Amino acid sequence: MAEVRYIGVRFKSVGKIYYFSPKDIAVKKGDKVIVETVRGVECGEVVLTERTMDEKQLSSPLKPIIRVATEKDFETIERNKKKEKEAFAICEEKIKKHGLHMDLVDVECTFDNNKMLFYFTAKNRVDFRELVKDLASVFRTRIELRQIGVRDEAKMLGGLGICGQPFCCSRFLGEFQPVSVKMAKEQSLSLNPTKLSGSCGRLMCCLKYESEAYQDLLKTTPKVGALVNTSEGRGTVIDVNLLTGMLKVKPDKSDNIITVKKTDVELLKDGVVKLDKNELRALRQLEGK
């Protein structure tokens, strides 16, 4: 079994980790390295020191790092940052000039100045061909415009969530995970769009964090609507506290609601966690990217 040595490199403070071959270059965590990517030559930060993996796990051969960043490379990075700020202002002027309905979010210049990327949001598709030509004539390099979603915009711009903490996406989430309305329903949360959505207008990423724990609890806890046997006879579960395991049950032969532990009842027929059509209609739009 052939093993391959690799290191993990990140190009944004909170971004996806890409693998490269260290060759014979000694690197440590936090080092800046120059590597070749599909976008061209870039400078990234080592976040995973040398490790090994089975060669069969690779979909394509690893590209080697070119070198550890030098003082000259850092000067290039600083020049590129200044260029990005200038490009942002120029692009906004060009957008107004062409009367395009789009909002510029960020500008990136590749390390080798081979390409400039302009990230924007827009409600509809935008014909930006003339804008690209205009920008190319100004910067004399390859221009790429990328339309991003509102979640990506929030990740790039950052901000504070309703919890008072910086956005999870801009603080530690390398990649977005799918979040569904069903997760909120399983956690017995209020299905109120204003309480479930983040600043980006989509379902909060943190709904995913405890989802597996709630799914495990649901496997051992009768759901609302379940038929159970209690010490006071058969009844229907009308409320559930998954974390404490306490159930509120309405006995068939009484109007008095009783509170019992889930371990003290016998499950006859379980209920189902489901969303009605009105809830789905109101919340489905929050699941988008």
Image (cartoon, rainbow, N blue to C red):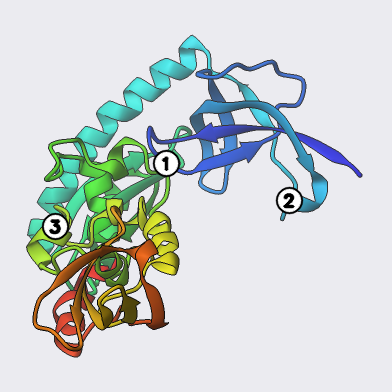
Q: Secondary structure at mark 1?
A: loop
Location of residue 116 in the rendering, given as x and y in whole percent from the top left corner: 36, 45
Q: Which mark is residue 2?
A: none
Return the residue nearer the eye: 251 or 150. 251
- CA separation in Å, label 2 and label 3: 42 Å
Residue 100 in view, yes or no: no
Residue 95's disc is 3
Q: Residue furthest top?
A: 71
Q: Earlier in the sequence, mark 2 or mark 3?
A: 2
Asked whether residue 131 is in view, the answer is yes
C-beta proximity under 8 Å, tags 3 and 1: no
Amino acid marked by disc 1: Gly
Mark 3: secondary structure? helix
Which of labels 2 and 3 is toward the front? 2
> Circle 2 is placed at which residue position?
58
Position of 235 relative to 192 (above/below): below
Q: Position of residue 55 (x, y in %)?
A: 81, 46
Q: Quadrant of the N terminus?
A: top right
Spatial CA distance of label 3 from label 1 is: 28 Å
Q: Which mark is residue 15?
A: 1
What residue lies at 40% left-to-right and 16% top-to-bottom? 75
Q: Mark 3 Cα within 10 Å, few/some/many (few <14, many 20+)? A: some
Amino acid under label 2? Leu
Give the spatial CA distance, label 1 vs label 2. Answer: 20 Å
Q: Residue furthest front?
A: 232
Residue 77 versus residue 158 in the image, above or below = above
